Image (spheres, rainbow, N blue to C red):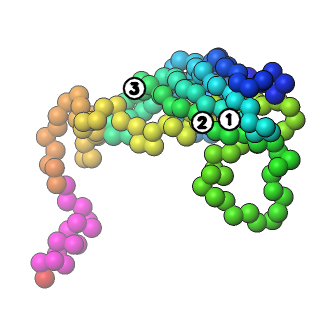
Amino acid sequence: MIVKLSDIEDRLIVKGEIASPVFENLEEEQFTIESPVRFELVITKLDDNVRISGPVRSTVIMSCSRCLEEFSCPLETYLDIEVEPKRLLSHEAEVELRPDDLDIYYYDGDEINLDPLIYDEVLLNLPIRPLCREDCAGLCHICGKNKNVESCACSQYASTVLGEKLKNFLNT
Protein backbone atom coordinates (compact mmCIF):
# COMPACT_ATOMS: atom_id res chain seq x y z
CA MET A 1 0.00 0.00 0.00
CA ILE A 2 1.39 3.36 -1.03
CA VAL A 3 0.59 6.53 0.91
CA LYS A 4 1.13 9.92 -0.70
CA LEU A 5 2.53 12.59 1.59
CA SER A 6 0.12 15.10 0.09
CA ASP A 7 -2.80 13.02 1.48
CA ILE A 8 -1.54 13.48 5.05
CA GLU A 9 -2.58 16.78 6.60
CA ASP A 10 -1.67 16.13 10.23
CA ARG A 11 -2.78 12.56 10.76
CA LEU A 12 -4.06 9.77 8.56
CA ILE A 13 -5.45 6.39 9.59
CA VAL A 14 -4.79 3.57 7.14
CA LYS A 15 -6.41 0.14 7.44
CA GLY A 16 -5.70 -2.77 5.17
CA GLU A 17 -4.23 -6.19 4.70
CA ILE A 18 -1.39 -7.82 2.86
CA ALA A 19 -2.06 -11.18 1.22
CA SER A 20 0.21 -14.12 1.91
CA PRO A 21 1.87 -14.34 -1.57
CA VAL A 22 4.12 -11.42 -0.54
CA PHE A 23 5.72 -13.68 2.07
CA GLU A 24 6.21 -16.71 -0.19
CA ASN A 25 9.45 -15.46 -1.82
CA LEU A 26 11.62 -16.16 1.22
CA GLU A 27 14.78 -18.23 0.73
CA GLU A 28 13.99 -20.42 3.73
CA GLU A 29 10.39 -21.48 4.18
CA GLN A 30 10.24 -21.33 7.97
CA PHE A 31 6.59 -20.33 8.14
CA THR A 32 3.40 -19.95 6.14
CA ILE A 33 0.96 -17.09 6.51
CA GLU A 34 -2.40 -18.62 7.45
CA SER A 35 -4.43 -15.40 7.39
CA PRO A 36 -3.71 -12.09 5.65
CA VAL A 37 -1.58 -9.62 7.59
CA ARG A 38 -4.00 -6.98 8.86
CA PHE A 39 -2.93 -3.53 9.98
CA GLU A 40 -4.43 -0.29 11.26
CA LEU A 41 -1.76 2.38 11.16
CA VAL A 42 -1.79 5.99 12.29
CA ILE A 43 0.45 8.09 10.05
CA THR A 44 1.47 11.42 11.58
CA LYS A 45 3.35 14.11 9.68
CA LEU A 46 6.16 15.83 11.62
CA ASP A 47 7.63 18.42 9.21
CA ASP A 48 9.61 16.27 6.74
CA ASN A 49 9.52 13.18 8.96
CA VAL A 50 6.58 10.82 9.25
CA ARG A 51 5.74 8.60 12.24
CA ILE A 52 3.92 5.36 11.49
CA SER A 53 2.42 3.39 14.36
CA GLY A 54 -0.28 0.83 14.94
CA PRO A 55 -1.06 -2.85 15.42
CA VAL A 56 -0.13 -5.53 12.88
CA ARG A 57 -1.84 -8.93 13.21
CA SER A 58 -1.83 -12.27 11.45
CA THR A 59 -1.71 -16.00 12.05
CA VAL A 60 1.27 -18.03 10.90
CA ILE A 61 1.87 -21.76 10.61
CA MET A 62 5.27 -22.81 11.92
CA SER A 63 7.11 -26.00 12.81
CA CYS A 64 7.79 -26.57 16.50
CA SER A 65 11.53 -26.46 17.22
CA ARG A 66 11.24 -29.41 19.66
CA CYS A 67 8.79 -31.87 18.12
CA LEU A 68 8.78 -30.62 14.48
CA GLU A 69 4.96 -30.67 14.33
CA GLU A 70 3.25 -27.80 12.53
CA PHE A 71 1.09 -25.49 14.62
CA SER A 72 -0.83 -22.27 14.22
CA CYS A 73 0.67 -19.25 15.98
CA PRO A 74 -1.05 -15.87 16.39
CA LEU A 75 1.24 -12.98 15.55
CA GLU A 76 0.45 -9.63 17.13
CA THR A 77 2.94 -6.80 17.04
CA TYR A 78 2.97 -3.03 17.13
CA LEU A 79 4.69 -1.08 14.39
CA ASP A 80 6.26 2.15 15.63
CA ILE A 81 8.78 3.72 13.28
CA GLU A 82 9.87 7.07 11.96
CA VAL A 83 10.42 7.68 8.25
CA GLU A 84 12.70 10.44 6.96
CA PRO A 85 13.36 11.72 3.45
CA LYS A 86 16.36 10.07 1.80
CA ARG A 87 17.92 13.46 1.11
CA LEU A 88 18.57 13.81 4.88
CA LEU A 89 20.59 10.59 4.88
CA SER A 90 24.27 11.16 5.56
CA HIS A 91 26.51 10.22 2.63
CA GLU A 92 29.71 9.96 4.67
CA ALA A 93 31.81 6.80 4.39
CA GLU A 94 31.45 6.00 8.08
CA VAL A 95 28.59 7.03 10.32
CA GLU A 96 28.25 6.12 13.97
CA LEU A 97 24.77 4.77 14.68
CA ARG A 98 22.91 5.79 17.80
CA PRO A 99 20.16 3.58 19.30
CA ASP A 100 17.54 6.04 17.97
CA ASP A 101 18.83 5.53 14.41
CA LEU A 102 17.77 1.89 14.37
CA ASP A 103 14.06 2.81 14.24
CA ILE A 104 14.39 5.19 11.30
CA TYR A 105 13.52 4.24 7.73
CA TYR A 106 13.82 6.40 4.63
CA TYR A 107 11.48 7.32 1.79
CA ASP A 108 12.21 8.75 -1.61
CA GLY A 109 9.99 11.25 -3.40
CA ASP A 110 6.51 12.07 -2.13
CA GLU A 111 5.27 8.51 -1.44
CA ILE A 112 5.81 5.95 1.28
CA ASN A 113 5.34 2.27 0.52
CA LEU A 114 3.98 0.62 3.69
CA ASP A 115 4.30 -2.99 2.49
CA PRO A 116 8.07 -3.40 3.09
CA LEU A 117 7.74 -1.78 6.53
CA ILE A 118 4.98 -4.18 7.55
CA TYR A 119 6.84 -7.10 5.95
CA ASP A 120 9.95 -6.32 8.04
CA GLU A 121 7.87 -5.99 11.21
CA VAL A 122 6.30 -9.42 10.68
CA LEU A 123 9.66 -11.09 10.01
CA LEU A 124 11.33 -9.42 13.00
CA ASN A 125 8.60 -10.60 15.35
CA LEU A 126 8.52 -14.27 14.41
CA PRO A 127 9.76 -16.46 17.27
CA ILE A 128 13.33 -17.69 16.83
CA ARG A 129 12.58 -21.05 18.47
CA PRO A 130 8.84 -21.58 17.97
CA LEU A 131 7.12 -23.97 20.38
CA CYS A 132 3.75 -25.62 19.78
CA ARG A 133 3.18 -25.31 23.52
CA GLU A 134 5.30 -24.30 26.50
CA ASP A 135 5.60 -27.84 27.90
CA CYS A 136 6.41 -29.54 24.57
CA ALA A 137 8.37 -32.73 25.33
CA GLY A 138 9.99 -32.84 21.88
CA LEU A 139 11.46 -35.86 20.11
CA CYS A 140 13.31 -38.76 21.72
CA HIS A 141 16.99 -38.26 20.89
CA ILE A 142 17.44 -42.02 20.42
CA CYS A 143 14.39 -43.41 18.57
CA GLY A 144 12.92 -40.13 17.25
CA LYS A 145 9.38 -40.65 18.59
CA ASN A 146 7.32 -37.59 19.41
CA LYS A 147 7.11 -37.66 23.23
CA ASN A 148 3.93 -35.55 23.13
CA VAL A 149 2.11 -38.37 21.33
CA GLU A 150 3.68 -41.54 22.72
CA SER A 151 6.30 -42.49 25.24
CA CYS A 152 9.27 -44.66 24.44
CA ALA A 153 11.34 -47.18 26.39
CA CYS A 154 14.68 -45.62 25.50
CA SER A 155 17.16 -44.91 28.23
CA GLN A 156 17.31 -41.25 29.23
CA TYR A 157 21.08 -41.41 29.32
CA ALA A 158 22.45 -42.88 26.14
CA SER A 159 26.18 -43.46 26.11
CA THR A 160 28.18 -41.84 23.37
CA VAL A 161 31.80 -42.18 22.35
CA LEU A 162 32.63 -38.77 23.80
CA GLY A 163 30.68 -39.54 26.97
CA GLU A 164 32.59 -42.80 27.46
CA LYS A 165 35.93 -41.05 26.94
CA LEU A 166 35.00 -38.39 29.48
CA LYS A 167 33.88 -41.05 31.97
CA ASN A 168 37.19 -42.92 31.55
CA PHE A 169 39.14 -39.68 31.94
CA LEU A 170 37.32 -38.74 35.15
CA ASN A 171 37.68 -42.21 36.66
CA THR A 172 41.47 -42.33 36.23
The amino acid marked with disc number 1 is Arg
Determine if residue 19 is in view. Answer: no
The image shows residue 165, relative to residue 128, as above or below, that is below
Determine if residue 94 is in view. Answer: yes
Answer left or right for 63 relative to 102.
left
Residue on which disc 3 sits:
71
Answer left or right for 166 relative to 16.
left
Local secondary structure at mark 2 = strand
Q: Where is residue 65 in the image (x, y as percent from the top left)?
A: 38, 40
The amino acid marked with disc number 2 is Asp
Residue on which disc 2 sits:
80
Q: Position of residue 128 (x, y in %)?
A: 45, 43
Residue 68, image quadrant: top left
| Residue under the point 63% across and 45% down | 103
Q: Position of residue 71 (x, y in %)?
A: 39, 26
Residue 51 numbered mark, or none = 1
* Residue nearer the viewer, 116 or 13: 13
Please report whichever mark, 1 or 2, sits nearer to the chain's N-terminal start: 1
The amino acid marked with disc number 3 is Phe
Packing grade of label 2 (10 A; few <14, some 14-19, many >=20) is some
Q: In the displayed image of the protein, which residue is found farthest to the bottom?
A: 172
| Residue under the point 53% across and 32% down | 78
Local secondary structure at mark 1 = strand
Q: Distance between the residues labelled 3 and 1?
A: 34 Å
Packing grade of label 1 (10 A; few <14, some 14-19, many >=20) is some
Magenta stretch: includes residue 155: no
The image shows residue 167, relative to residue 40, as above or below, that is below
Local secondary structure at mark 3 = strand
The segment highlighted magenta reads 158-171
